[in-house]
Amino acid sequence: MTRMWMIVAIAGMSMFASAQQPKVINAQLHTEAAGAGLPAVVEQLNHSAGPQWLGYAVPAVPGSHFSMCSSDESMKNDGCCGVYRLEAENNNYRSSDGDHGTETSIEILARIDKGAIDRIRFIGTSCQLDAGGLPFTWLTDVKADDSVTWLSGLVTGDDRRDADQSLAAIAMHETQKATAALEGFASSSNPLWLREKGAFWLGAGRGHEGYLALKKMEGDADPEFRKKLVFDLFVSKDPAAIDDVIGIAKQDKDVGVREQAIFWVGQKAGKKAIAMLKDTVENDPEVGVKKKAVFALSQLPKDEAVPELLHVAQTNNSPTVRKEAIFWLGQTHDPRALDYFEQILSK
């Protein structure tokens, strides 16, 4: 190797090492390699006295926008919320919008006390941490798949709060193993609360892979789970997901599931959504479902909602459905609705 290439290689390794270091203050910081595997290192730290933090970084889902903020802080232009205080109790996950920079890596943070994990956090690597004066062990060379496996073990523990944070952290991992783990938690062999959370993060965090996993669950035997599944499809960023929500609204055998799907379709303006709602008002066999569709029409932008509600009020065969449309027309305070009411009263 030439001298120049040696310099380049050393510089590259230095840049990688610095990228692996957290921006942490107010901490007794030391670094340790995780060559023995993440579970083994955590087990070793579990035997240390007193509370402490450990952290490591893994690649994040491409295009991720997220931060962890204290409730009294606002998000900055870089997607961070000032200094993130690990020992604060009022920290919350926030998903930032496209105006903030995307994260390429995610820091997983765990608090250890009395021989057990008592808190899980995650944050973008661009943000600064305050460890509250506690020991902080930064682990290097952690494999993303090992991280998913370790966090999955925390999901099934006794503390639901750790489960919530662990599931969210898993969803932010770039590795495909994260999708498989969430799909496993959403399977019918698990309690409903865990299934719902696993499915939510498939929709909210896993893109096209997550959508495909959710699609396989549309025939699930539990209608309560299918009601939640509708929302999971709704929050998915995959453009095909809305067609599945429409399909559920039309075809699901359970009235409650169809009603839930209709509600979420109503939050999506567009030709597909309006056509589906109009068809439901006209053709669904259940009056209650028709009424839900009328309500969903009322939630559309006013210039779309008022003409559709007027049409239902004037033409639908069901007096109950017509009455529902008239009620929601009254809530619009639109001149077209008032003209229609005047016509009715003048007859």
Image (tube, helix red, strand yellow):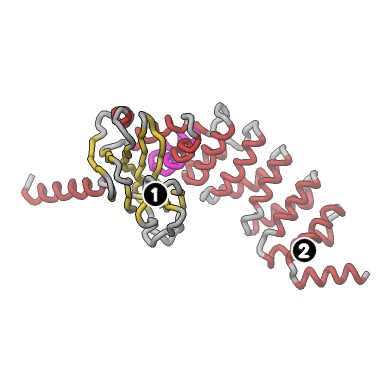
Q: Residue at the location (23% across, 40% down)?
A: 30
Looking at the rendered structure, the kind of residue marked 1 is: Pro
Magenta stretch, residue numbers: 168-184
Q: Residue at the location (27% across, 45% down)?
A: 27
Q: In this rendering, would 224 be left or right of 27?
A: right
Q: Secondary structure at mark 2?
A: helix
Looking at the rendered structure, the kind of residue marked 2 is: Leu
Magenta segment: does it hold 280?
no
Q: Which residue is mark 1?
A: 62
Q: Residue at the location (84% across, 62% down)?
A: 314
128 is higher (above) or lower (below) than 180: below
Q: Nearer the viewer, residue 270 or 72?
A: 72
C-alpha separation, residue under disc 2 versus residue under disc 1: 44 Å
Residue 76: x percent and y percent? 39, 60
Magenta segment: does it hold 171?
yes
Residue 344 visible somewhere in the drawing: yes
Q: Which residue is mark 2?
A: 329
Q: In this rendering, would 251 be left or right of 149?
A: right
Residue 40 visible somewhere in the drawing: no
Q: Nearer the viewer, mark 2 or mark 1?
A: 2
Q: Residue at the location (52% across, 44% down)?
A: 203
Residue 4: x percent and y percent? 8, 51
Q: Please tell me in which quadrant of the rendered image residue 253 appears.
A: top right
